[in-house]
Image: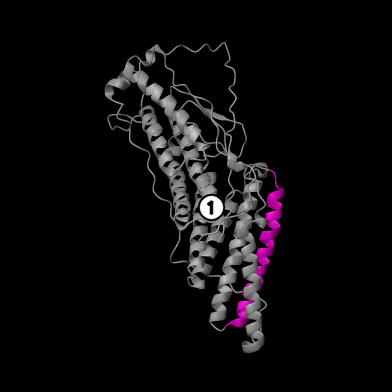
Amino acid sequence: MTHWFHRNPLKATAPVTFNYYGVASTPAAAKICNDLRSSRARLLELFTDLSCNPDMMKNATDSYFSLLQGFIVSLDDSSKDSKLRYVQNFKWTDTLHGQVPSAQQDAVFELVSMGFNVALWYTKYASRLAGKEDITEDEAKDVHRSMKIAAGIFKHLKESHIPKLITPVEKGRDLEARLIDCYIIQCQAEAQEVTIARAIELKHNPGLIAALAYETANFYLRADQMLSSLDPAYTLKWRKYFHLKSCFYMAYAYCYHGQTLLASDKCGESIRALQEAEKFFAKAEALCKEYGETKGPGTTAKPSSHLFFRKLGTLVKNTLEKSQRENGFIYFQKIPSEAPQLELKANYGLVEPIPFEFPVVHAQWTPETLAAFDLTKRPKEDSAKPKPEEDVKPMKEPDIKPQKDTGCQIS
């Protein structure tokens, strides 16, 4: 079984120096600023470092986020914000809107934007791993786990931190609930693709495989519908991906449902189910072509030439021919004009996000170090002189370029 996943670009950000001359009045306060600057830079470097693994990413995120928490939460466990929450301006682009940045003078905006990128990194790590030839069982498990971690991060951002932003989220931007939900569903659906691959390899009951494929197809359909009211200039390529994956897994569902029907001596219904599988596969094939020709954010690929796609076409064809032969020799059953309704519910293998929490405040933050930040010493801004707009340079991502169309074999 093979996999191919669409990926949107990482968010890009303007540099942040955390230089508070005069404000950070002690060596301990200055050290926090230096550590914030270096840990942020390190984390941004790792996003595009192909040698980075989940352990390296977790260490880097824990280091930066634990320091950043001192700018967000109160040290006395009260519900009050840190006095430093609004001292620094942060600027981030969106995954769909190119290099058009949003800026907020709010450390929570930095927390959710960087957290969003961490979740994206886990999806991209999983995608690169799944794109290897001869992927091992342990690597397949890493793909599965990385998707669930990413889904858990997106869910935590949506439920616990994005609602705390002072500035409302703009429609169609990354932090809007619909887009976050799309990313969560995509992670769950892609993790279930790994589950389906494993079930096929271990020759599990065709009924279970059909049910998992049907649930996965519906995940992709839901994600597609969530983007339907957003500007197609930004979402069309992503929607093509959701649509083609939905058709692809509907073909899988009908194919394995056809096997179940044949095993139950319902050969006529089996043939009709497999004919429906052929239809969905043909739709997916057409959408693969459209996806490859559609401009927009995301990976460049020709999914119809990937092994994951070609294998399904062969499976549907061979299974249909088998049912037709059996019907011609043994059953002589009439083929229904209507395709069987899929009312399949998977009792096993459904993916749930792994719960995520940001790390607690770093030990460097004490009441004394916080008190050493004297906000009365902040330089007064000269409003008569407009500040020049900083360019936000895009992340240099190796996996946005076309890749070798080998897919991955789960063994």
Magenta span: helix, strand or loop, mainly? helix
Task: Judge whether 202 appears above or below 223 on screen.
Answer: below
**Residue 352 in magenta stretch:** no
Res. 28 visible in picture: yes
Residue placed under numbered mark 1 in the picture: 130
Residue 78 sits in which quadrant?
top left
Where in the figure is residue 238, as x and y percent of width and height?
Answer: 62, 48
Relative placement, left or right, of 285 versus 8 is right
Q: Residue at x 65, y 54 (%)?
A: 303
User: What scheme was used to colour the molecule?
Assistant: one colour
Task: Judge whether 227 appears above or below 344 on screen.
Answer: above
| Element type where label 1 sits in the image | helix
Where in the figure is residue 323, as x and y percent of width and height?
Answer: 63, 79
**Residue 267 in magenta stretch:** yes
Task: Judge whether 149 appears above or below 48 on screen.
Answer: below
- Crowdedness of circle 1 by 10 Å Cα count: few (<14), some, many (20+)? many
Q: In the depicted view, which residue is nearer to us: 148 or 200?
A: 200
Q: In the depicted view, which residue is nearer to us: 92 or 108?
A: 92
- Magenta stretch, residue numbers: 266-295
In this figure, what is the number of numbered marks?
1
Farthest front residue in view: 134
Where in the figure is residue 281, as x and y percent of width and height?
Answer: 66, 64
Relative placement, left or right, of 27 versus 277 is left
Q: Amino acid at mark 1?
A: Ala
Where in the figure is residue 241, as x and y percent of width and height?
Answer: 62, 52
Q: Residue at x 52, y 11 (%)?
A: 382
Quarter of the picture containing the N terminus is bottom right
